[in-house]
Amino acid sequence: MFGKLLLSIFGGDFTAGYTSLTILAAGQLFNALTGSVGSTMMMTGHQQPAAWLMIQAALLNGVLNLLLIPHFGIEGAAFATAVATVAWNIRLYHFIRHEIGLDTSLVILFTRKRND
């Protein structure tokens, strides 16, 4: 909400990163909404699939950085990172939901019927 104001505390040059910060924050919001997918994978003994999916996300991030940074600069890097973060979380969430049978999503907290 006050991104530019908060960034200006560190100096005027930092406000140039506002758009990138917004893009990265959107990726992290999605990360939060999927719940603790990484921790759930580790606690249920699925470290190897989690590591493989992280490697895939890192490769996706690298490829997107190579494609987007030359044309979009820092915003391209932020977008690449946000997309890789979202992709990794979707893949982990899908694995947990279908292979383990758990729903780690925070969305379930708002969609579950209450018996009050």
Image: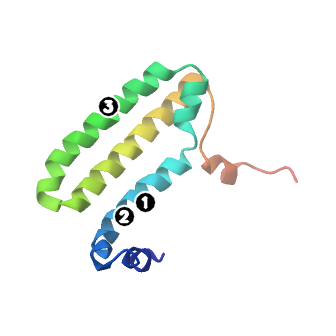
Residue pictured at 12% horizontal, 59% vertical:
71
Q: Where is mark 2, residue-wise? A: 21
Using the image, determine if residue 42 lies above or below residue 27: above
Which of marks 1 and 3 precedes in the sequence? 1
**Where on the picture, by quarter, is residue 61?**
top left
Residue pictured at 38% horizontal, 57% vertical:
24
Q: CA distance from mark 3 to mark 2?
A: 24 Å
Q: Please state which of the two labelled residues, at mark 3 or mark 2, is closer to the viewer.
A: 2
Using the image, determine if residue 112 lies above or below residue 92: below
Residue pictured at 76% horizontal, 50% vertical:
113
Disc number at residue 25? 1
- Callout 3 crowding tier (Cα within 10 Å): few <14, some 14–19, many ≥20: some
**Amino acid type at image mark 3:** Gln
Q: Where is mark 3, residue-wise? A: 56
- Callout 1 crowding tier (Cα within 10 Å): few <14, some 14–19, many ≥20: some
Give the x, y percent position of residue 115. 85, 49
Give the x, y percent position of residue 37. 54, 36
SS assignment at label 2? helix
Q: CA distance from mark 3 to mark 1?
A: 21 Å
Q: Are marks 1 and 2 in contact (CB under 8 Å)?
A: yes
Give the x, y percent position of residue 2. 47, 77
